[in-house]
Amino acid sequence: MSKIRVSIVGGAGYTGGELLRLLLFHPGVAITQITSETYTGRFVSKTHPNLRKITDLKFSAIDDLQPCDVLFLCLPHGRTMQKIDFFRKTAPRLIDLSADFRLDSIEDYRVWYRIEHPAAHLLKEFAYGIPELHRQEISKTDYVSCAGCNATAAILALYPLYYHNVVDHNSTVIEIKAGTSQGGATGNPATHHPERSGAIRTYKPFGHRHSAEINQELSLHSPVKVHLTTTSIDMVRGIHCVAHTFLKNNLNEKDIWKIYRQTYQDEPFIRIINERDGIHRLPDPKLIAGSNFCDIGFSRDPDTDRLIVFSAIDNLMKGAAGQAVQTFNIMHNMEETTALTFPGLHPV
């Protein structure tokens, strides 16, 4: 079987490097080009030193892209939408890792991103790239918009509860703690080591843009409004999500377990954590660094109607590059776990 020719646009960042690492070991892929406007002509391994002796690819300019089968788009938010016509002419299939086509509503882009979307007519053409929710749409489309990393952790944690309509729709409070790689490869005062090391910095008490995705994907029975706060912690990879929900009915932990098992029992990258003792009773992003897993657990407050749901992902994997490869596999009718079976390291 001939390999699928893919190129990566915006490959100098952490997400682009992680995507390249995965695709280099994908048996069904031939990588044709990887672009960077800053590092055009330089070896990829200069920017991604973990790939020394793995690839001799050099960065190309976007304008030098040649036709291929699939483009993975890893550009900063707002850039893909500006060049979408060029990208559509370059490849028949696009997988976008930015936020440019994640939202269904033009108005949501005005509210959350303060922009008038220049390609709003294409919003409905992109499947939202969380396979556990949209596998059928992804399998039939040529365009996928991968979910945001914070949104992925929160949506996967909460989806079974909203799908089965067992929690109050507008009272969910979500706290996301995220690693520093979420901020990208370009340094700024917040990532300067003396300012960053040992810090726990809440950077969005409210109004985080990923709230729009969470609201969109959880509005299964009626409109939803979650309350999201995001905090950066002294960890390179990983997202730890804690969601406080409030049950409509007096469900016990066994009932909740059945809901999650019914929803996710056939999902290759969802693990429901239900340990009764030990130090690994609840999801921990340290345990899944480098993997495409999402670990989910929960704890029922016996004195109130509160159910606390926990999830953990690697923001560069299930939150970005890994999920992109997972959608690629689905789009091409390949085994969904291809190139994604690494389980993470312990200890690390």
Image (spheres, helix red, strand yellow):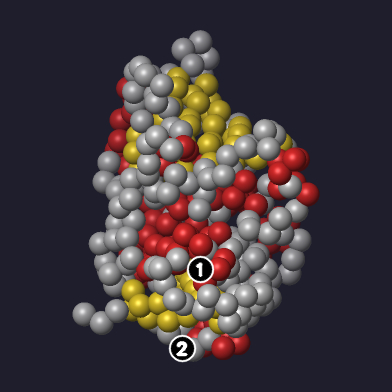
Say how many tags the image has: 2
Report the side of 253 relative to 34 (left or right).
Answer: left
Please report the residue visible at 53 percent of the width from the left and 36 percent of the height from the top: 241
On the image, the x and y values in percent for residue 245 come to: 53, 29
The crowding category of the residue bearing disc 2, from other C-alpha atoms within 10 Å (few below 14, some 14 to 19, many at least 20), is some
Compare residues 13 and 252 and report the one nearer the observer: 13
Q: Which residue is labeled 1 in the image?
A: 45
Q: Are marks 1 and 2 in contact (CB under 8 Å)?
A: no
Q: In the structure shown, which secondary structural element does the residue marked by tag 1 occupy?
A: helix
Residue 345, labelled with which disc?
none
On the image, the x and y values in percent for residue 5 come to: 38, 80
The image shows residue 179, relative to residue 65, as above or below, that is above
Q: In the structure shown, which secondary structural element does the residue marked by tag 2 occupy?
A: loop
Amino acid bearing label 1: Ser
Q: Which comes sooner in the sequence, label 1 or label 2?
A: 1
Q: Is residue 43 visible?
A: yes
Please report the residue visible at 27 percent of the width from the left and 66 percent of the height from the top: 334
Please report the residue visible at 47 percent of the width from the left and 38 percent of the height from the top: 285
Q: Which residue is labeled 2 in the image?
A: 67
Please report the residue visible at 74 percent of the width from the left and 66 percent of the height from the top: 115
On the image, the x and y values in percent for residue 281 come to: 39, 24
On the image, the x and y values in percent for residue 194 come to: 75, 40
